[in-house]
Image (cartoon, grey):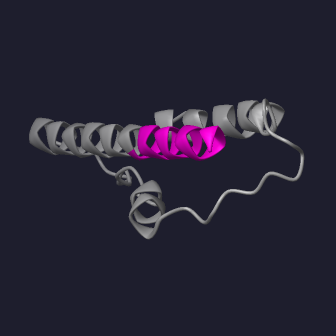
Amino acid sequence: MRPLVLLIIALLVILPGCQTVGLPLDAAFPAVPPEIAACAKRTNSAVPAKDLSAAEVEATWKQDRFTNVALRQCLQRLIVRDQKLAKK
């Protein structure tokens, strides 16, 4: 399975359990900022149904690594934002 799919599955399984930890049940956070939402919509490269050259594999791998780092940074920004909002 692709790492992104595994990450999404893990988040869907783990996050609902910690949704209200330390917060009242009616706590509401403002909408996710557009730049974080846009970043979170990034997807990994589609793998074509043909044999790839070494250069194509390397280019696809680099693009996927870049996307995964960007997604991790978006998630970190969202976590920091929510932690700041929870302290208020």
Relative horizontal placement of residue 18, taking residue 50 as reference (left or right): right
Prevailing secondary structure of the magenta residues = helix
The residue at the point 20 percent across, 39 percent down is 62
Question: Is 67 in the magenta?
Answer: no
Q: Nearer the viewer, residue 32 or 69?
A: 32
Picture quarter with the C terminus: top right
Q: Nearer the viewer, residue 77 or 63?
A: 77
The percent position of residue 71, horizontal first and vertical second, equals 40, 44
Relative horizontal placement of residue 13, taking residue 84 as reference (left or right): right
Relative horizontal placement of residue 60, taking residue 67 as reference (left or right): left
Q: Is residue 30 above or below residue 6?
A: below
Q: Nearer the viewer, residue 23 or 66?
A: 23
Quarter of the rendering containing residue 18: top right
The residue at the point 48 percent across, 64 percent down is 33
Residue farthest to the bottom, as pictured? 34
Residue farthest to the right, as pictured? 25
Q: Which residues are magenta?
A: 74-88
Count of residue discs: 0
Residue farthest to the front, as pictured? 88
Picture quarter with the N terminus: top right
Quarter of the rendering containing residue 31: bottom right
The percent position of residue 15, horizontal first and vertical second, equals 72, 36
Q: Is residue 39 above or below residue 6?
A: below
The residue at the point 65 percent across, 36 percent down is 11
The percent position of residue 69, horizontal first and vertical second, equals 32, 37
Question: Is 86 in the magenta?
Answer: yes
The percent position of residue 17, horizontal first and vertical second, equals 82, 32
